[in-house]
Image (cartoon, rainbow, N blue to C red):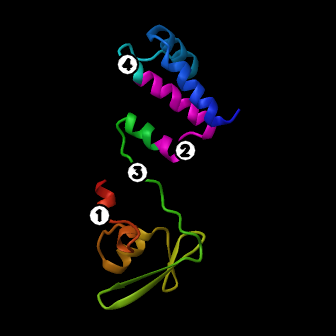
Amino acid sequence: MSAEVRILNRWDELSVLDRVALRKEWLEIFGAPPAQFLSLIFMRKALIWQAQADAYGGLRQNSKRMLAAAADGGKIRPPKMHLPPGTQLVREWNGRRYLVNVTQPGFELDGSEYASLTAVARHITGANWSGPRFFGLTSAKRKAA
């Protein structure tokens, strides 16, 4: 039986369960009882999501970390951008063209090594810039979202 068929069958099973049976399923799947006043449809959706996660894979580790940080009231940071070594970034600033090479340990500009793009942007501008934003790898809209 395919994963899709198993999930559809699971949805059919869950759709006929009453509150007591859904709470029992929840306890079995999640290892703790659900909050007392969760709606039946919410419990069904959470249980079917878990079935899908089991069949197709759940959240990525970085998503889990961000959710855990949010739950703890901490600052949520987007996942780090991966630039493979050998990538070159070009930025023109005040009439000068800057070529930054991505290296294994960090970034290289004019023969000097930097640990981050933000350090490179600070060196070029003399101000505190977000390095990825300075080089056009992110936008202000994405930051606000």
Query: In this rendering, which labeled residue sits more in front, label 4 or label 1?
Result: 4
**Separation (CA) of disc 4 from disc 1:** 37 Å
Seen at 35% across and 66% down, the residue is 130
Q: Circle 1 sits on which residue?
A: 140
| Amino acid marked by disc 3 | Arg
Within 10 Å of the Cα at label 2, are there few (<14), some (14-19), or many (20+) other Cα atoms? few
Q: Answer with mark 3 or mark 1, whichever residue precedes in sequence.
A: 3
Query: In this rendering, which labeled residue sits more in front, label 3 or label 1?
Result: 1
Tag of residue 81? none
Query: In this rendering, which labeled residue sits more in front, label 3 or label 2?
Result: 2
Q: Circle 4 sits on which residue?
A: 38
Q: Answer with mark 4 or mark 1, whichever residue precedes in sequence.
A: 4
Within 10 Å of the Cα at label 3, are there few (<14), some (14-19), or many (20+) other Cα atoms? few
Q: Which residues are magenta?
A: 42-65
In this rendering, position of residue 67 left or right of residue 6: left
Q: Is residue 28 visible?
A: yes
Secondary structure state at the residue bearing disc 1: helix
Secondary structure state at the residue bearing disc 2: helix
